[in-house]
Image (tube, grey):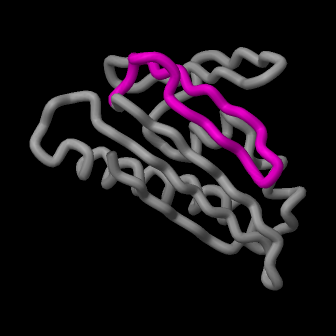
Amino acid sequence: MQEVTASRVVDASPVVVSHWLEPATVVEAEGSFTVETIDERADATIVVASGPGMHLPLRFEERDDGLYYTQEGEQGPFAHMETWIDVEDVTDGTRVTFRSSVSLAAPLPFGDRIAAWKRKGELTRALESLEAELG
């Protein structure tokens, strides 16, 4: 298992950033998958995302300081994937930090490193998209 982090300060309030952090928006902003369905439940939002040859259920939960999500079930590229998005009010705006823990499902040499590299790119793209839209 590998952990990756990406962080950025955006020129927007925590309230504005939190509104942007909708599950479907986050999935699309990461750039690897498109949203197929959204199932709003009392305790979570399940987003089924699709990519080349796969469907990936992601379970999103609201947290006090941001958003948490994980790959649900055994479908998808990861044996394990969970991500925390933390939102912090700072002097210059809002610091948004994505932290993800991943393990690749395929038995490849250095598979977890490959998964972490891929995941880091997704988190960085999401932050770039957030910054482009909010400032």
Up/down of 21 relative to 15, above or below:
above
In the image, residue 128 lies at what x, y percent?
Answer: 57, 62
Q: Nearer the viewer, residue 77 or 135?
A: 77
State the image quarter where residue 83 is shown: top right
Furthest-bottom residue in this view? 91
State the image quarter where residue 23 is shown: top right
Quarter in which the C terminus is drawn: bottom right
Up/down of 36 relative to 129, above or below:
above
State the image quarter where residue 11 is shown: bottom right
Q: Is residue 115 magenta?
A: no
Furthest-front residue in this view? 1
The residue range painted magenta reads 55-77
> Predominant secondary structure in magenta?
strand
Q: Is residue 52 left or right of residue 59?
A: left
> Which residue lies at the image location 82% right of the left edge and 68% below the top edge?
12
Q: Is residue 89 left or right of residue 78?
A: right
Up/down of 13 relative to 29, above or below:
below
> Which residue lies at the image location 53% right of the left edge and 55% below the top edge?
99
In the image, residue 27 lies at what x, y percent?
Answer: 58, 37
> Which residue lies at the image location 41% right of the left edge and 54% below the top edge?
3
Furthest-left residue in this view? 109
Quarter in which the N terminus is drawn: top left
Q: Is residue 61 magenta?
A: yes
Q: Nearer the viewer, residue 26 or 57?
A: 57
In the image, residue 22 lies at what x, y percent?
Answer: 74, 39
